[in-house]
Image (cartoon, grey):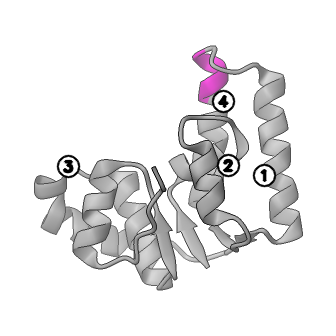
Amino acid sequence: MLYLDTGCLVKLYYPEPDSPQVSKVTRGQTLIYTALHELEISTALQLKVFREEATQEQANAAQNLLNQDVDSGILCRLSISLHEPFSQAVSLSRQYTARTGCRSLDLLHCATASWLDVEGFLSTDDRQVALAKVIGLPLLTIPA
């Protein structure tokens, strides 16, 4: 299974730069979907409405497409305790934030992906990619 940072997950449901490339890399794969993703993608879509980058109808349509993929199993909803990933994220913060500039949720995504021992990790955030490299996550790349 693949783990996508929420920024990449949003690109699958709402057109953004790199959306076609993210779709190509993930096509036919099962994608992990956690409560963290659920919160972040809901927030990201509503922020698009707030910033007038999308209408409420467009945000709802994107959310509906995502919900269909959860129901069909394309997005594999994992109900996991975030206790261990949070603990690991704190440790990663102390070790790597001064070097990588990673923010809290970037750390938490990397820690969760590491804890789940994923087959691939995808992010378009340079700081998060730097952390993923340092901790040995199996990085996927977006074709140019």
Which mark is in front, 3 or 2?
A: 2
Q: Earlier in the sequence, mark 3 or mark 2?
A: 2
Q: Earlier in the sequence, mark 1 or mark 3?
A: 1
Q: Quadrant of the N terminus?
A: bottom right
Q: Earlier in the sequence, mark 1 or mark 2?
A: 2
Q: CA distance from mark 1 to mark 3?
A: 30 Å
Q: Is residue 87 above or below residue 142?
A: below
- Residue 106 in the image: state x and y as whole percent: 37, 55
SS state under label 2: helix
Q: Amino acid type of disc 2?
A: Leu
Q: Is residue 81 above or below residue 54?
A: below
Q: Residue at x 84, y 25 (%)?
A: 57
Q: Residues within 10 Å of mark 1 (few under 14, many from 20)?
A: many
Q: Which residues are magenta?
A: 47-51
Q: CA distance from mark 3 to mark 2?
A: 26 Å
Q: CA distance from mark 4 to mark 3?
A: 26 Å
> Looking at the rendering, which quadrant does residue 59 occupy?
top right
Depth check: 39 or 102 in front? 102
From the viewer's perspective, is 25 left or right of 99? Answer: right
Q: Is residue 125 above or below residue 122?
A: above
Give the labeled residue for mark 1.
66
The image's mark for residue 101 is 3
From the viewer's perspective, is 103 left or right of 52? Answer: left
Q: CA distance from mark 2 to mark 4?
A: 16 Å
Q: Is residue 128 magenta?
A: no
Q: Amino acid type of disc 1?
A: Leu
Q: Earlier in the sequence, mark 2 or mark 4?
A: 2
Whether the residues at callouts 1 and 2 have beta carbons within 8 Å, the answer is yes
